[in-house]
Amino acid sequence: MTVSRLDIASVRNIQHATLHPAPTLNFIYGANASGKSALLEAIFLLGRARSFRSSSIKPVIRFSHDHLLVTGQTVFSGGAHQHLGVRLDAKSCEIRINQHTMPNRSSLAYALPLQLIYPKSYELLDSGPQERREFLDWGVFHHDPAFLPAWRNYKKALAQRNALLKNRQPEYLQVWNQELSDYGTIVTHCRRRYLEAFIPVFQDIAGYMLELPAIALSLSSGWDATESLLQALDADTEKDLRYGFTQSGPHRADLLVTLDRLPARDIVSRGQLKLLVISLKLAQVQLLNLHEEDTACILFDDFAAELDMANRAKVLRYLDVMHSQVFITATSPTDFGDLSNIHNYKMFHVEHGHINPVDCST
Ligand SMILES: Nc1ncnc2c1ncn2[C@@H]1O[C@H](COP(=O)(O)OP(=O)(O)OP(=O)(O)O)[C@@H](O)[C@H]1O
């Protein structure tokens, strides 16, 4: 899946822009505050109908405008086209795929899978388990159609059980324990199956990116794995009533990243940590490439930050052979390094919210 045309209106400092990106690498450069991240944000809006920088949409809409609009055409590997559109204002969100209004964001996420790598991504291993669960679940969502309905039902059941715990109504807990256990077990199976497929792909990329002994990945399921989820929920009843929320289950799961049985974050350097996160993110896209005809589009913001030239070249070589569409930003074209061996790329210059193609033929 590649974006062949993009129309942006009123996203941050981009008033209007039309882009015809390359199906391969797209290099975007411009001074600080020129609008490079705003461009990636617009593409992200087209695939998720939300921003990756602001939790509310208001700051994303151009000052003194009341809505933003991003539309685009994507092309499947077989040549078929798809039209996507997202219109957002402070109160509403309208999503259209091929002229049909869609009721939820997940249809958009399937229509345009996006993998985002930006400065905050490098906090993946330092931050709490929620970020790692979200990382893992992005892959599970695209890998296994059983995941999303089970996860939605699980979260509904969890909200019901937590409400009972808060209201101290233990007599109804049993029903919700069963629901949680049924859906939670499916969610965990999906995650485990995904991780099994993911690990060899990740090892391959990490072996290329990092000069480190093998990095191990494992899933901590979110409850004592020696018992079933139902047993854990039953056993936790008293504790859960005391705290007023459910303490065991896949909503507490974590992806463990270890090196020689120690948390990788305690061992690796900043640069290695960055390459490790990049390897995890690219492995998800690579796995999608292996199983789906149409792959994800990669948004890579602030490419040069904290990576030396040799590592940038290494990452770029990998991106070049991935057969994915990539949008990659930096403040200067020289930050991308030597592009003489990279073919069929496009370059864009961003200045005060204006996006102009750069002729790289000479
Ligand atoms: N709602 C808005 N309306 C208009 N302009 C905005 C709005 N929100 C942010 N801006 C401005 O848009 C500009 C683009 O910011 P953006 O973060 O995209 O820049 P950037 O090129 O990625 O910069 P950097 O290299 O510093 O990360 C900034 O000048 C910012 O102040």
Image: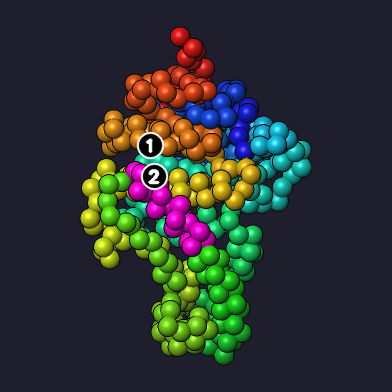
Q: Is residue 66 left or right of residue 303?
A: right
Q: Nearer the viewer, residue 357 or 286?
A: 286
> At x 53% / y 36%, what residue is drawn?
323
Q: Is residue 117 left or right of residue 211?
A: right
Look at the numbered disc 2 and give the secondary structure of its residue: helix
Residue 110 in the image: state x and y as whole percent.
63, 48
**How dense is the environment of label 1, judged by Cα within 10 Å: few (below 14), some, or many (20 and up)?**
some
Tell which circle, 2 or 1, labels the residue nearer the N-terminal end.
Answer: 2
Q: Which mark is residue 17?
A: none
> At x 58% / y 43%, what residue is drawn?
295
Residue 14 in the image: state x and y as whole percent.
52, 25
> At x 61% / y 32%, what residue is drawn?
3
**How dense is the environment of label 2, judged by Cα within 10 Å: few (below 14), some, or many (20 and up)?**
many
Looking at the image, is 200 positioned above or below residue 161?
Answer: above
Alpha carbon distance from label 2 to label 1: 8 Å
Residue 195 in view, yes or no? yes
Q: Is residue 115 left or right of residue 274?
A: right
Q: On the rendered image, what quadrant is the C terminus found in?
A: top left
Look at the numbered disc 1 and give the secondary structure of its residue: helix
Quadrant containing ligand 1 reads: top left
Q: Main secondary structure of the magenta part?
A: helix
Q: On the rendered image, what quadrant is the N terminus found in?
A: top right
Residue 66 in the image: state x and y as whole percent.
60, 34
Residue 38 in the image: state x and y as whole percent.
48, 32
What range of the chain is rendered magenta? 194-209
**Tag 2: residue type?**
Ile
User: Is the shortest distance between ligand 1 and the CB of mark 1 under 8 Å?
Assistant: no
| Residue occupied by mark 2 | 278
Q: Which mark is residue 315?
A: 1
